[in-house]
Amino acid sequence: MDDVEVVERPGAFTRIKNFFARSEPIDEENLDVVPKSPRYQSLHRYSIVVRRQIVSFQDAVAAADGIKRGEQQILNITAADPALREKIKDFMCGVNYAEEGTWEEIGEHVYLLAPPQALVEVAPSTPRMAATRN
């Protein structure tokens, strides 16, 4: 009974410090090696599909399948008939809403549809661009 050793429990700060501390020793020989920046290191490939001429509803279904796979779509429906154009636009709006994606009008009858994991930033229009729209 004389050999009882009392060990103090580490406090919260010590446990947090030990959690973030490096457990392996630092290799001083390879300090010159610069690791790849995680900002430029891609986890997976990102796909963008440009559909230049959508003239049938089957083309719109192919674009909808791409959105479901997580691919960004740029749709140009200027060549479609006006009635078919509205039908394709309504269909793609529904698919994009169901996937919780982003919908942006790039030009007249040209649209950008992006999956929810894509960050789409829309720059404010310049005064010159705003004047041409009025």
Image (cartoon, rainbow, N blue to C red):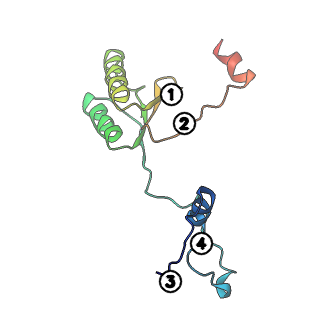
Are dots 1 and 2 in contact, CB under 8 Å?
A: yes
**In this figure, which residue is indicated by the disc labeled 1?**
104
Give the SS element for disc 3.
Answer: loop
Q: Identify the residue at image location x=40%, y=27%.
A: 77
**In this figure, which residue is indicated by the disc labeled 3?**
3
Are dots 4 and 2 in contact, CB under 8 Å?
A: no
Q: Identify the residue at image location x=50%, y=83%.
A: 3
Give the SS element for disc 2.
Answer: loop
Give the SS element for disc 1.
Answer: strand
Disc 1 from disc 2: Cα separation:
9 Å
Eye-nearest disc, 1 or 2:
2
Using the image, determine if residue 13 lies above or below residue 32: above
Q: Residue 9: image x %, image y %?
A: 55, 64
Q: Residue 98: image x %, image y %?
A: 33, 28
Q: Nearer the viewer, residue 89 or 24?
A: 24
Precedes in sequence: disc 3 or disc 1: 3
- How many neighbours does mark 2 have within 10 angstroms: few (below 14), some (14-19), or many (20 or more)? some
Eye-nearest disc, 4 or 3:
3
Disc 4 from disc 2: Cα separation:
37 Å
Question: Looking at this rendering, what residue extends furthest in the right direction?
Answer: 127
Precedes in sequence: disc 1 or disc 4: 4
Eye-nearest disc, 4 or 2:
4
